Amino acid sequence: MSITTSLNKITDSIPEHCTLVAVSKTKPIESIHSCYEAGQRDFGENKVQELVDKAESLPPDIQWHMIGHLQRNKVKYIAPFVNLIHGVDSSRLLTEIEKRAKNEDRIINCLLQIHIAEEDSKFGFDEQEVLNLIEQNSFQELAHARITGLMGMATFTEDEAQVRKEFRSLKKLYDKLSSSIPNPHQMEVLSMGMSGDYQIAIEEGSTMVRIGSAIFGSRP
Ligand SMILES: *Cc1c(COP(=O)(O)O)cnc(C)c1O
């Protein structure tokens, strides 16, 4: 199946209120261009250098999403243009994004990454850590880094009930924060769902899915 056929199939299968981020990591410029020609504008990458290189050689109206783990010393490279940072997993990273966004005279929208999977992962906050974070003075002072939602990844398993349970827990936290996160931060994006589990994620309230292999084919 061609990339555009796969893209159209997925676009047709997700509701209008849900944004599709086409995850183009490891894929060549030409593949991204095919999606662009078919109307896709949101693309996600998980490595800073690759993101910067691709952004330079593709049309400027693409909305770039940084979906991978982001090291503090690399924020400066994407700060001028990135549309949304999905993987904010520490208060120190947030402080660095604030600094670089201020330098660029921009507001950078960010999602807090929440650890919902059973699997061990170094990345992501748990619920209590997020509640503590939004109470911190440094959080209250953010003027250029803005939290606009949450991102999570479910356990990689065939067990649908497990995946659903994890997405549901993320949605629950999202709803809780919707009424408690201080302005100008707000909950408007719930980024959950990948090629293997996006349908479940949408049923559980996802507003943004990140889909790679189901569009571009499997990665090496
Ligand atoms: C690679 C990646 C995706 C896309 O994964 P697929 O299974 O290829 O759809 C989504 N989110 C994150 C954070 C990723 O790293």
Image: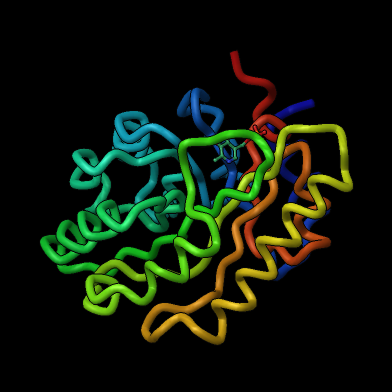
Left or right of 79, for residue 122: right
The quadrant in which the C terminus is found is: top right
Residue visible at 77% across and 59% down in the picture: 202
The spot of residue 78 in percent (x, y) is 27, 46
The quarter of the displayed image where residue 159 is located: top right
Where residue 155 sits: x, y (%)? 71, 38
213 relative to 134, above or below: above
Could you tell me residue 36's position as x and y percent? 54, 44
Given residues 165 and 85, the one toward you in this image is 165
Q: Is residue 143 visible?
A: no
Of the four image quadrants, the one with ligand 1 is top right
Q: In the displayed structure, would residue 131 be above or below residue 160?
A: below
Residue at x 86%, y 33% (from the top left corner): 158
Q: Give how far across and how far down residue 187 sits, in percent.
A: 53, 75
7 sits left or right of 122 in the view: right
- Visible in this render: residue 27? yes
* Residue pictured at 36% horizontal, 77% vertical: 135
- Color scheme of the displayed model: rainbow
